[in-house]
Amino acid sequence: MKIRPVKIHTHRENILFLRKDSDFCRAQSGPALEKIEIVHGDRLLVGTLDQVDEGFLEPGEIGLSEFAFVTLGLPAGTEVEVRHPEPIRSVELIRRKIHGEVLGREDYAYIVRDIVRHRYSRVELTAFVVACAQAAMERDEILYLAQAMVDQGEKLSWGREMVADKHCIGGIPGNRTTMVVVPIVAAYGLSIPKTSSRAITSPAGTADTMEVLCEVDLGLEQMRHIVEKESGCVAWGGAFSLSPADDIIISVERPLNIDASGQMIASILSKKKAAGATHVLVDIPVGPTAKVTSYRQAYHLRKLFEFVGEHMDMALDVIITDGSQPVGRGIGPVLEARDVMQVLHNDPAAPRDFVEKCLDLAGRVIDFHPAVRGGYGRSVAEEILKSGRALDKMERIVEAQGRKAPKALGERVLEAKAAKPGRVASMDNQKIAKCAKLAGAPTDAGAGVDLLKRVGDAVADGEPLFRIHAEEEADLGYAWDYWLRHEEMVGIE
Amino acid sequence: MKIRPVKIHTHRENILFLRKDSDFCRAQSGPALEKIEIVHGDRLLVGTLDQVDEGFLEPGEIGLSEFAFVTLGLPAGTEVEVRHPEPIRSVELIRRKIHGEVLGREDYAYIVRDIVRHRYSRVELTAFVVACAQAAMERDEILYLAQAMVDQGEKLSWGREMVADKHCIGGIPGNRTTMVVVPIVAAYGLSIPKTSSRAITSPAGTADTMEVLCEVDLGLEQMRHIVEKESGCVAWGGAFSLSPADDIIISVERPLNIDASGQMIASILSKKKAAGATHVLVDIPVGPTAKVTSYRQAYHLRKLFEFVGEHMDMALDVIITDGSQPVGRGIGPVLEARDVMQVLHNDPAAPRDFVEKCLDLAGRVIDFHPAVRGGYGRSVAEEILKSGRALDKMERIVEAQGRKAPKALGERVLEAKAAKPGRVASMDNQKIAKCAKLAGAPTDAGAGVDLLKRVGDAVADGEPLFRIHAEEEADLGYAWDYWLRHEEMVGIE
């Protein structure tokens, strides 16, 4: 049959379309036919079959969703063979996991290989994710999954003995420490070629925030060149195919809003390993509206991180931090970049908690260096920040990545005010993030929330708590409505 | 926006199509946008969003997959509002189930309601199925799920104090006992308005086999009329919307090939309850290639069936039967109908095991009747069969449902022969079923496998083991190839 691209974008799933009246569909008893396979030379693509009525395809055509068409990589009209796929053997492993078995190293290798080859439907992928989430993977299983994820992707190497990295498990708005830690660590002379993500469900990812200042979509050669010269950079990781299985797994975790610890650890450490890191600091914020809500849970996670990291040949340090409220004041790319630059400028207006957290983290990364004995990394970091060397390094990195014209803050502004006098007792990370997103962040870089008060501050009746910035009037309205319906996002006692 | 049917058949999932360049898609940050909602008056439909390139839809149009279009039930071109859906609250319950919580009665009611309203994507539906499969639902949870499934569908009532039913959990080819049990029980005078399914993955369902003899797609009034007159019938259950949640859940269980006990029990008992049964016999075959492979597992299932049945106000009897090989000789609609009629005619050629099993089952159903004390139901059943009253009843039922012209057996035949002399030691239910399916069953009613030997029979070298019947030469070839590659399906020692 001849292939024809059908311009449908299908959440990373290969969908193949056949006419209901085609020989292939007529010969099958309908409901059991779920998947088909197309073959051309040594190329092979398995996909979920959707049957279509006539008029949609010409007789003799097989339609491919955009994702399937790109994956197959053959021109429209190419003649292919259509057949029943061999059963995917690794699906049997998923069944075993569902039935409570512990899987082994080879099992995870098969599963991840089939994920990366896009052989799973979203039903099968979800089954894998949920089976692993629910059964609480054993620590060996997490290790096997992480290693399989590294093996099935690109690997960067930097030709250095020590390559530092840091990662926060996420969930805390405004927590843009990477953009301060990287220049401090790089100024110290330790290599820190950071690859960061864009926001998936948050109001700003590190890549989105760095992009306010400079380009982040760097090629590998450019990145290598910058790291050679400056020891550090902050690039968008999506430009590389590091742990591609992770992106596919996330595509079903996201709509389910689950982020099971085993898969999270495998995801994070596989990306770090693939990015060539040898020494990794992991930040676990704890708080009632953070991802991790108890210290007990955080300690358990730390042990798992350490076990898996060690067996992947990385030196790992886990820091447990305060996740009870957003870090810093700005939430949204331009606002967060402003906070970052205030810290680097030693501006007295810089949010104190943000400064302290950056120094804690940078200190712990510097502590990795064998020259730093007795854990005085933090004082090294502080000296680098205070002396202006961190700012200087940041400017050089921004210049090397390609400085951008300054971006303006969203000019449409409303102030959320306290409904009663008292003291700020709590701030809901998730609701504040949602408010910033409704204002337009990160699509509109200048949109977001600017916190004027923090937990512990006294407020008078009617005193402003935060400012909402938006670029579009409608978005300002959405965010404002959300605030009015969720005033509990800032608890006053 | 104006709705436009897109003639794509999408495995019972609502898929909605929007142009990538539509205002709605452009205003959203892409990857997080998974679901949208369309509203028209009091109608509301939630679906998974697939973005399409221009040319596929006109500006201002929203495309609906065939399933979504039929579900919404509005004419093409109708103006609808497109918006973000409210988060589906019951998805939070699924998350809690994934995290190991036990859910309550109301929780299952919410989940099943959202399943029946087609508010779940296949990702969410799979998450529910796998979470319940893996955590081994508690018996209360199975009850809650079953009750919720009954509540969310049609219910039949027969205005009688006792309505009998029987059900086999499946997996054994040739096991067409219903068509003998119903006439025996009906001849005794007990009401048994049987609704049966067509094959989903097997070579023949009871509805497929009954359809060889007569119509099975009966309306409710016709069914009621037949039961009034004859006490029994064998109708296709798909004509009624009994436990519609079950059909949707099966649509993801099937591709995963999982059939977890909790969901299986809820599925079976919800359909029986909805069909108006008061007394139900459940048949659990046990064997190495049956669904249930150990007696321990069968006893555990029996207890769960009894608990849930009792709390749904049904009298339940569970019979554990021999599932070590196919029942009877024929596998495929025409062949199975032949076996049934041989049994009803007291033909000496009738397969003995099939006769015995039918009498066991019919006897246990008759035992439900308060007039039958001391469990002599089996001898009542035997008397009814031997006397020809069961045959007479079957003829009346067939006449009432609408007799069909006799269907021929597939004329293309090959005989599978023993490769060595010895004794038949085993028969693989699944492989024999697969062979019959490849021969064309149940799509071609005359296709299938006719067993000439059974476990325990002596065979000479080269003696025929079974005959493959097909209507098409190609299908005969597929089945024959499968036999040649899987001769172990009949073990000879």
Image: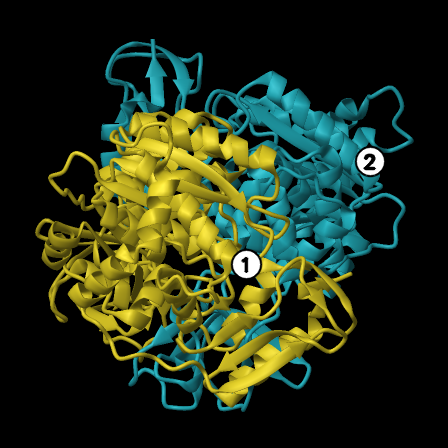
Chain colours: A yellow, B cyan
Position of residue B323 relative to residue A466, above or below, is above
Residues at marks 1 and 2, common chain? no
Q: Where is residue A263 in the image (x, y as percent from the top left)?
A: 42, 40
Instruction: Kindly identify which chain the residue marked by label 1 belongs to.
Output: A
Q: Where is residue A277 in the image (x, y as percent from the top left)?
A: 25, 40
Residue B310 image label: 2
**Which amino acid type corresponds to the residue marked 1 in the rendered image?**
Pro
Instruction: Read off the residue under disc 1.
Output: A326
Please name the residue shown 63% across and 75% down the image: A482
The image quarter containing residue A444 is bottom left
Residue B8 in sight in this render: no
Please name the residue shown 66% across and 54% down the image: B111
Q: State which quarter of the image contains the C terminus of chain A.
A: bottom right
Position of residue B31 relative to residue A274, above or below, is below
Q: Where is residue B1 in the image (x, y as percent from the top left)?
A: 49, 89
**Which amino acid type corresponds to the residue marked 2 in the rendered image?**
Glu
Nearer to me, B243 or A429: A429
Nearer to me, B229 or A462: A462
Q: How many labels does the image show?
A: 2
Please name the residue shown 73% across and 34% down the image: B139
The image quarter containing residue A19 is bottom left
Secondary structure of the residue carrying numbered label 1: loop
Q: State which quarter of the image contains the N terminus of chain A.
A: bottom left
